[in-house]
Image (cartoon, rainbow, N blue to C red):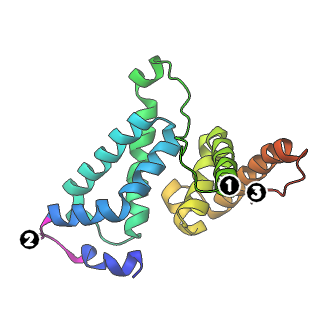
Amino acid sequence: MNDLQQFDYLKHVTGGLDRSAVLDELMREYGKDVWNFAFFMTRQRELADDIAQDVFVKVYEHLYEFRGQSSIKTWLLAITRNKARDALRSSWLRKVTLLPVWFDRDTHPSAERETMDKLEMEEVWSHVLELPRKLREALLLNSHYGLTMKEAAELLGVSEGTVKSRLHRARTAVNRKWAKETAACGEEEWV
């Protein structure tokens, strides 16, 4: 069942719904997506924890206001984006010097290939994290979260052409960085 079908009833609810039960269901279904998007926006685990919590508090408070103008996932990612942008703009965060965040490494790989694949994927994601925020957002929304160009454009408040341009520039930048690292190995580009 896709997002629109599973939570279609929410656009018709005006009260009397057990918001806690719906919130639990939304957190189970989209909690990881919300946290990951917050992390990729901020590059900080603790801040992503705070943002994800804030997102679901806001969803709880405004659940009856959802009217289905977008999918639930798009609505949640839009709230996440706004919360992340607010957090990044806060004067407290700008005054604090933060150390770079590294991915957790799996210490018990089952095979050499799995380990190599994981390391390659970590490299790709580290390149994605180095992209400017606007390019990173477009790439994540399209490639990782599967939003259409139209949905991403609506979420970002830009035209579809702008999303396509940012997506192209993001992929080109990641491919360029990846090509530099893999040129000696003769590996293919990441797309």
Q: Which mark is residue 117?
A: 1
Circle 3 or circle 2, nearest the eye: 3
Tell me: 132 left or right of 52.
Answer: right
Q: Residue at x 69, y 57 (%)?
A: 113
- Badge 3 element: loop
Residue 66 within the segment the image draws in magenta: no
Say which residue label 2 marks: 16
User: Which of the two residues, 4 or 175, is positioned nearer the viewer here?
Assistant: 175
Task: Please tell me in which quadrant of the rendered image residue 68 appears.
Answer: bottom left
* Disc 3 to disc 1, C-alpha distance: 12 Å
Bounds of the magenta span? 12-18
Q: Nearer the viewer, residue 187 or 113?
A: 113
Residue 190 drawn at (x, y percent): 76, 57
- Which image quarter holds the C terminus? bottom right
Q: Nearer the viewer, mark 3 or mark 1?
A: 1
Q: Secondary structure at mark 1?
A: helix
Tell which circle, 3 or 1, labels the residue nearer the N-terminal end: 1
Q: CA distance from mark 1 to mark 2?
A: 49 Å
Question: Mark 1 vs mark 2: which is more N-terminal?
Answer: 2
Front in this rendered view, residue 28 or 121:
121
Residue at mark 3: 190
Question: Which element type, helix, strand or loop, lies under badge 2?
Answer: loop
* Label 2 crowd bin: few (<14), some (14–19), many (20+), radius 10 Å: few
Identify the amino acid type marked 2. Answer: Gly
User: Mark 3: which amino acid?
Assistant: Trp
